[in-house]
């Protein structure tokens, strides 16, 4: 290739690269107007707590500041309360929030204001107002505040989080690490995420940079509407790693309405323990593909118990909403008010059924079933699973709230050991059949099919779940 030709090709490639960069930049959104319009309604939130004052110089007490933290904590725990006068700390900037109404209602995260003695809201013009905590909902991590002022307050525009789509641009405004009115942008990564500490909130996952101080701040769409409240991040370092989670504004405004109307928040509840349906479970229960929420356990006298649901039912639809993943069910149920009638489509004994029941109220705390006590002596040992089992006592049935089952006494090398069975496990269902006696267990075990997925319901330490296995010829 001649030098002239090489130069021509090089210049052409550079021009094409520059043109592509210009076009790509031209297609990126411009957030300047959105930020200018929305920022005045975003606020910084700080709190003050009254804490015990450190005490030194008490008779027989060492110098606290000179001790390692672990010993300092030990000695401070021993200080009588009357010897520890309380002192007011300076306000600490903890998070963000936003004004949702002209009369001064402010929305933020519950963890931003939890346990605060005083709450302060700083506006964009640097005015600092004392806020009243109207109400909070720790389960959704939301808190509603109220500030009083004679001036007109700027407010955000509320959007609809249900209309969000993965890949859509979103923007956050908040105070990460105390840097007020910081703006970060990204896209919606996914919707309807359940987190380990809360499965009743269908979180919006984004890649918007969120850090400590952003909590409680608004998440905007390109129309300048609030579609979420920035709440949590996933991190191994303590800082942003590309996984941020926001509470959908539809959920938040429902919480706000309930706090205003009745001072607390109620959610629907079925009273079931569910698990995901994998490929093997789907085959065992006669489903064409993995879908739905498998009922592994039913709370006694709960809505599911009195409404006709059974252990082993796979919930495929709830009030007309398809349940594709098991995490979809708590989101759908939690949106209903207690006392609402709901229609469910379930797969039972490989047939679809429609069940109508009344949704109950989600309790604050759940009670775990009691552990099993010693079994009776009647046992079965020779079976295709390679396990020894015994009858359940009447006391065990009462404690576990089960009608029937057998308890595993010994696990030998074989199929039972390979699927992780342990001594003390309770087997209540095998191959979609209720195990009501040793004789039934022996019969069902002899008739287990080969080279096909078989399901087994096991209760371990009060918790029930389904497992699957295959037996060779």
Image (tube, rainbow, N blue to C red):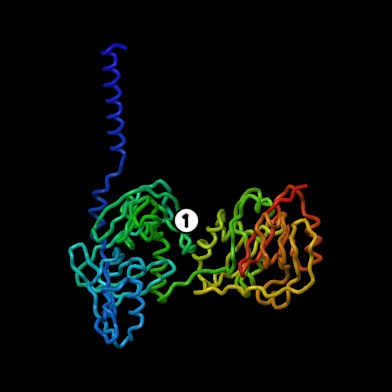
- Closer to the camera, 373 or 469? 373
Q: Which residue is mark 1?
A: 192
- Closer to the camera, 283 or 192? 283
Residue 51: % across, % down: 29, 78
Which residue lies most toward the top here? Answer: 2
Residue 98: % across, % down: 29, 63
Mark 1 Cα-neighbour bin, 10 Å: few <14, some 14–19, many ≥20 = some
Lateral position of residue 331 relative to residue 211, left or right: right
Looking at the rendering, which quadrant does residue 404 occupy?
bottom right
Q: How many marks?
A: 1
- Closer to the camera, 125 or 241? 241
Lateral position of residue 224 relative to residue 160, left or right: left
Q: Is residue 134 above or below residue 220?
A: below
Q: Is residue 465 above or below residue 400?
A: above
Q: Residue at x 40, y 76 (%)?
A: 263
Residue 16: % across, % down: 30, 26
Q: Residue at x 72, y 64 (%)?
A: 410
Looking at the rendering, which quadrant does residue 271 occupy?
bottom right
Residue 342: % across, % down: 58, 65
Q: Residue at x 27, y 51 (%)?
A: 34
Q: Secondary structure at mark 1?
A: strand
Q: Is residue 33 above or below residue 180?
A: above
On-image quarter of the N terminus: top left
């Amino acid at each position: 290739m001649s030098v002239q030709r090489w130069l021509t090709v090089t210049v052409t490639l550079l021009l094409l690269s520059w043109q592509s960069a210009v076009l790509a930049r031209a297609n990126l959104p411009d957030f300047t107007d959105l930020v200018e319009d929305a920022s005045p309604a975003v606020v910084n939130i700080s709190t003050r707590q009254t804490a015990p004052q450190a005490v030194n110089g008490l008779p027989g007490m060492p110098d606290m500041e000179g001790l390692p933290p672990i010993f300092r904590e030990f000695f401070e725990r021993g200080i009588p309360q009357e010897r520890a006068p309380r002192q007011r700390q300076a306000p600490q900037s903890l998070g963000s929030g936003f004004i949702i109404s002209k009369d001064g209602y402010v929305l933020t995260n519950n963890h931003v204001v939890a346990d605060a003695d005083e709450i302060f809201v700083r506006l964009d013009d640097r005015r600092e107002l004392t806020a009243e905590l109207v109400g909070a909902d720790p389960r959704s991590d939301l808190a509603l505040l109220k500030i009083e002022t004679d001036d007109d307050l700027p407010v955000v525009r509320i959007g609809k989080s249900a209309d969000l789509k993965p890949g859509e641009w979103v923007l956050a405004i908040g105070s990460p690490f105390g840097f007020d009115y910081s703006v970060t942008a990204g896209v919606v990564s996914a919707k309807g995420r359940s987190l380990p500490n809360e499965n009743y909130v269908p979180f919006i996952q984004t890649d918007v940079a969120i850090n400590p101080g952003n909590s409680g701040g608004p998440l905007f769409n390109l129309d300048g509407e609030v579609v979420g409240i920035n709440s949590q991040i996933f991190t191994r370092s303590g800082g942003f790693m590309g996984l941020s989670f926001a509470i959908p504004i539809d959920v938040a405004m429902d919480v706000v309405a309930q706090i205003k109307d009745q001072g607390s928040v109620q959610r629907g509840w079925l009273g079931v323990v569910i698990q995901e349906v994998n490929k093997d479970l789907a085959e065992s229960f006669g489903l064409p593909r993995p879908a739905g929420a498998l009922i592994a356990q039913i709370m006694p006298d709960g809505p599911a118990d009195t409404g006709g649901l059974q252990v082993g039912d796979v919930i495929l639809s709830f009030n007309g909403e398809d349940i594709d993943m098991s995490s979809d069910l708590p989101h759908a149920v939690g949106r209903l008010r207690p006392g609402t009638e709901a229609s469910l489509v379930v797969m039972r004994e490989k047939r679809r059924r429609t069940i109508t029941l009344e949704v109950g109220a989600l309790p604050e705390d759940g009670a775990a079933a009691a552990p099993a006590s010693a079994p009776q002596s009647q046992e079965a040992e020779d079976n295709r699973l390679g396990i020894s089992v015994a009858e359940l006592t009447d006391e065990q049935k009462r404690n576990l709230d089960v009608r029937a089952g057998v308890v595993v006494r010994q696990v030998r090398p074989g199929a039972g050991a390979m699927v992780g069975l342990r001594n003390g496990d309770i087997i209540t269902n095998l191959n979609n059949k209720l195990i009501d006696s040793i004789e039934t267990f022996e019969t069902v075990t002899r008739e287990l099919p080969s080279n096909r997925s078989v399901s087994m319901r096991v209760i371990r330490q009060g918790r029930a779940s389904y497992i699957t296995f295959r037996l060779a010829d």
